[in-house]
Image (cartoon, rainbow, N blue to C red):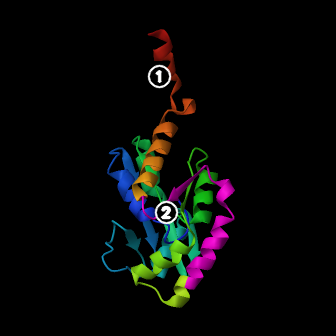
């Protein structure tokens, strides 16, 4: 799940996770400082730049990017183990990170999240009160660049300002429909159905 900063990805992921116990959230690593209320290992793994680079050098990230002056990455070991255990995994990389994951996991489903109006991005970012005006302006510029990649995603979910629950419903419909795609059934299960 990707999209511009301020689109509401955290809220939507939280809403989706309450509906699916077989859905795991992939906690990303970052070199940025924690925002008020963020917890280590729950919201992010907060790493020094040196530690991030060390893990990167040993192949510890599925994807990684520099975004707005900070490093972000998806720890590979968590994704690999969760998939082996039969879980669906949701992560929130930035747009290029999502495309990198798709290149390594062709079955990955990419969902682009946008607000119903781009003007809502500024107000949401300002409401956080965690960034300077210059940082907000940089994030808005990045948001417009990211939107140019929307056609490389599988789904677009519009997070309406007054009805975020509708976007969670849309995400739930995507998860459910993707689970029933024929190629996700093992041949043994299809054979059992045929022979029953």
Give the residue drawn at x 45%, y 82%. Answer: 126
Q: Which numbered disc, 2 or 1, marks the residue that appears first in the sequence?
A: 2
Give above or below for 113 relative to 72: above
Whether 158 is among the magenta residues is yes
User: Where, by quadrant of the figure, is residue 95 drawn?
Assistant: bottom right
Given residues 64 and 196, the one toward you in this image is 196
Give the residue drawn at x 47%, y 49%. Answer: 171
Tell me the SS state at disc 2: strand
Give the residue drawn at x 58%, y 49%. Answer: 105
Q: Name the residue under label 1.
A: 189
Give above or below for 41 relative to 83: below
Looking at the picture, how far across and down is residue 150, in whole percent? 65, 59
Given residues 151 and 123, the one toward you in this image is 123
Tell me the SS state at disc 1: helix
Looking at the picture, how far across and down is residue 111, in whole percent? 55, 54
Give the residue drawn at x 63%, y 68%. Answer: 146
Q: Farthest top residue?
A: 195
Q: Residue 74 carries which label?
A: 2
Given residues 54 and 82, the one toward you in this image is 82
Region in magenta: 137-163
């Amino acid at each position: 799940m990707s999209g511009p900063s301020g689109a509401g990805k955290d809220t939507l992921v939280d809403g989706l996770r309450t509906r699916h116990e077989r859905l795991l959230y992939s906690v990303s690593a970052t070199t940025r400082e924690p925002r008020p209320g963020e917890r280590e290992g729950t919201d992010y793994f907060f790493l020094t730049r040196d530690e991030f680079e060390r893990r990167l050098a040993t192949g510890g990230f599925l994807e990684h990017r520099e975004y707005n002056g900070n490093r972000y990455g998806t720890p590979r070991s968590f994704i690999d183990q969760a998939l082996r255990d039969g879980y669906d995994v949701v992560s929130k990389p930035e747009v290029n990170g999502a495309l990198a994951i798709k290149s390594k996991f062709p079955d990955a489903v990419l969902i682009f999240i946008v607000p119903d109006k781009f003007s809502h991005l500024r107000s949401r970012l300002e409401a956080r009160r965690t960034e300077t005006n210059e940082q907000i302006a940089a994030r808005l510029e990045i948001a417009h660049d990211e939107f140019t990649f929307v056609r490389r995603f599988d789904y677009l979910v519009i997070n309406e300002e007054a009805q975020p629950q509708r976007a969670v419903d849309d995400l739930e419909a995507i998860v459910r429909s993707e689970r029933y795609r024929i190629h996700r059934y093992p041949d043994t299960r299809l054979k059992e159905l045929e022979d029953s």
